[in-house]
Amino acid sequence: MPKRTAAPANFNIDRDIPVGKAILLVDNLGVTQERDGTLAVVCVRGRIDSATSVQFEAELDIVFADPPDALIIDLTDLNYMSSAGLRVLLVVAKRARAEERPLILCNLAPGIREVFDISGFSTIFEIAATRAEAEARVRG
Amino acid sequence: MFRSLRFQLFAGLMVILLGAGLTITISTREQMREALIGAETRAARNVLGQIELQVSNRYRELLAEKLRIVNERRDALEHMGAVTVAAAEAHDRLSDRGQASRAEARALTLDFVNAVSPGGSVQALAMTREGRVLAHSDGSQKGRDLSAQPDIKGRPLPVAVQEDIAIHGHAYILFDDSAVDAGEDGEDDGARDGRRFAYFREVPELDLIIGVSDRIGDVERYVETGVAATVEVLAETLAQVRVVDTGFVFILDDELNAVTPPADWAAPLMRERDPVSGTPIPELLAAAARGDDPATLRYALPGAQAPIEMQAYVSYFRPLGWYVVSTVPSAEVNRPANALTRQQGVIFAMVLGVALMLAWLFALKLTGPLQRLTGYARQLPGQDFTRSDGAQGALDRLADTRSEVGGLARAFRFMEGELRENIRVLLDTTRDKERIESELNIARDIQRGLLPKIFPPFPDNPQIDLHASLTPARHVGGDLFDFYFLDDHRLLFAVGDVADKGVPSALFMAITKTLVKSASGQETDPALMMRRVNEALSADNPRAMFVTLFIGILDIRSGEVDYVNAGQNPPILLSTDGHADLVRPISGPPAGVMEGVVYDRLKLRLASGDNLVVYTDGVTEAMNDDNAEYGTGRLLALLQRLRGQRATRLVDGVLEDVRRHSDGALQSDDLTLLCLTWHDTSPRE
């Protein structure tokens, strides 16, 4: 479930925030973790940009607090990823590589996939088309 | 004013006082009225009762007097009768002794009767059993035949006499002898009252009935005279009797004529009709008395302006056939009650006035502290909150009271204290923020200083038309661009975008730019330059910062571009023939991602007039409020439209279009755009 930071009841966005209409009052990011034995599957939903990347990093830190043998990050419901998000993924990848835990991304939407391709990140990450394929690779 | 607490308190108290006062007034008023009216009514009735008592006493006296006279007369009649009978019996004894014959004895008796002179209105007679008058003290009546004369009960006189004598030995007979009396008496009322009262006894030996009679009219007249005197006295008395104020007592007889007159002011009462019932008022009064209980009668007496409401108490005095009426204007009966009610009203109004004044003072006292609190709250914003002491002292006395207002004052004081504390913290924070802000401003100036800022950069070089722009999302940004000649013919141009934005990116950007500069001095191949940059950035990079970087080297003689693209957005090649194409190939991942990456060296060739546009994702991913990206498609289309224009125009045109798309939305990422146009100036072969 995405965390929601409800604005106070008497808080009127239009009136009380003079500038910066794009201020995110509600988290646009949702991260859920499923554990299947020693395999962790993290599903990311929404947007990862400068504003939410800190939360994303924190959520992944929680995953690593109890380190899984392998990690699958399912990006099915991810709409947008900025360079800040890529950086967080890179941090995770480096950590996973250092600890020799396989990390596979799966279910990249075409737009996200293009970001990975353009930036050259698709050569750094292991990417599977579907979650089943990712799981098969981890277990195989 | 009407919504103020003070007024509401005051109004509330007013309503309560009014409610209580009115309830008491109204509830007691009726009882008071009834009591007072009852008293007046009793007074009127008492007058009536006294008059009635007076009348009946007088009447009883008259009756007693009448009885006494009648008895006296009867005794006289009996005495006279006894004398006459005794004479007759003496005459009879003469015949018994033979001194005279029976006829002579009878004649003697008749002579006696004829000669007797009883005096006054008394008459003596002797008659046969059949009613023939043989002798009469009034000579003119001698020889009358009384056999047809009826007594008061209608019996023939001789029959009645004999019947009563048979029973009692004598007879008292009442009969009307008006016809005879009239001629003889010559009195005015003789014809009216010729009734006589007669005492008869029989003298059987002489075959005679002796009778003595007297008129009873004068007895009746005596009573009438008494009544008349009574009436006169009553009239005088009643004229002075006042019921309540102008009320009065008067008497009507059976024929509804005034025995004693009503008061002068109410004289029309005798001939007027009650407007409501239409009945003559005397009839109404008489009707009211027919019940056993003398009821209160209400009627209206037509007056000069308006009918006067009256009430009357009537009693019927049967023996005289009198209606004794005590009547009084209703207003007078009600007057004391009304006066008392008025007085009560005045007292109530005065008490209410005083109470309301007190209520107002009370409301003032209650709301005064509130007003002081309001005044305090109003002047609060004008306080100098940077000082630790303030207007708190103003509330000390209020805060010491134990009421709710005291609580409010304490809350105010607490609030002011908290405000001072918060403002102190806020001031500290603001100072810190200002310091950071000023440092950031300095950082921005330094960062700007890192970038080339003289445009056009190469005015003496007709082959190159170059323009670039960098707009950070915050004070400082992670984007960079640079260009400089490596030697006479080779122009290096670079565009980079550090992951994320803000101060960490800015630091990384500065490092990157320096690394590029340094690497370009050591290598001629841009791929090798990139490799050096990557190695330098990747080593010891705990936060995994990275930079997408494009480095191109243009040979201004041929238009050939050697370039390396480390994850940077594909540049756009805008041909003179109208195509706008993405230059998709990339050399590898962004610099700083990992060590040991080998980048591919790529080439492209510009035709004369071709534009190469290198940009960061801040352009294509610029968003509006609906989170819609500007998009590569729109950029391509725009550049096609702007084809052929100078680099400055192209850059400005794109920036303007992006701004239009964002439509005021907060810029989410640094935005960098570099446009390079190459013109072939070599002589044609």
Image: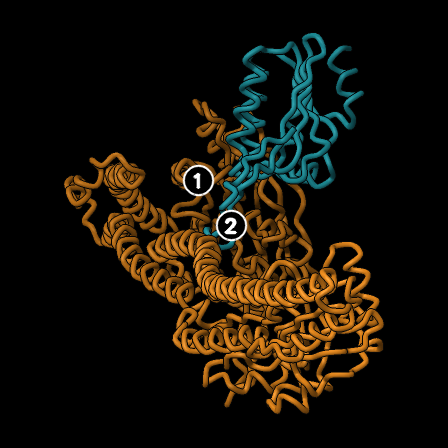
Which residue is nearer to you in this view: B17 or B598? B17
Which residue has dot 2 on it?
Answer: A13
Mark 2 vs mark 1, CA separation in Å: 45 Å
Chain for colour orange? B
Q: Colour of chain A?
A: cyan
The location of residue B623, given as percent across then percent down, is 59, 52
The location of residue B60, given as percent across then percent down, is 52, 62
Which residue is nearer to you in this view: B286 or B61? B61
The subunit letter for the residue under badge 1 reads B
The subunit letter for the residue under badge 2 reads A
| Mark linked to residue B516 | 1
Task: Please say whether residue B136 is visible from this viewpoint.
Answer: yes
How many tags in the picture? 2
- Where B499 falls versus B111 (above or below)? above
Which residue is nearer to you in this view: B373 or B319? B319
Three-letter amino acid code at the position of disc 2: Ile
Label 1 crowd (10 A; few <14 / some 14-19 / many >=20)? many
Identified at 73% across, 37% down, the residue is A109
The location of residue B487, given as percent across then percent down, is 43, 50
- The residue mark sitting in front, 2 or 1, is 2
Identified at 57% across, 44% down, the residue is B563
Q: Secondary structure at mark 1?
A: helix
> The C terminus of chain B lies in which quarter of the figure?
bottom right
- Where B110 falls versus B625 (above or below)? below
Choose top left, top right, bottom left or bottom right for residue B477. Answer: top left
Q: Is residue B388 left or right of residue B436?
A: left
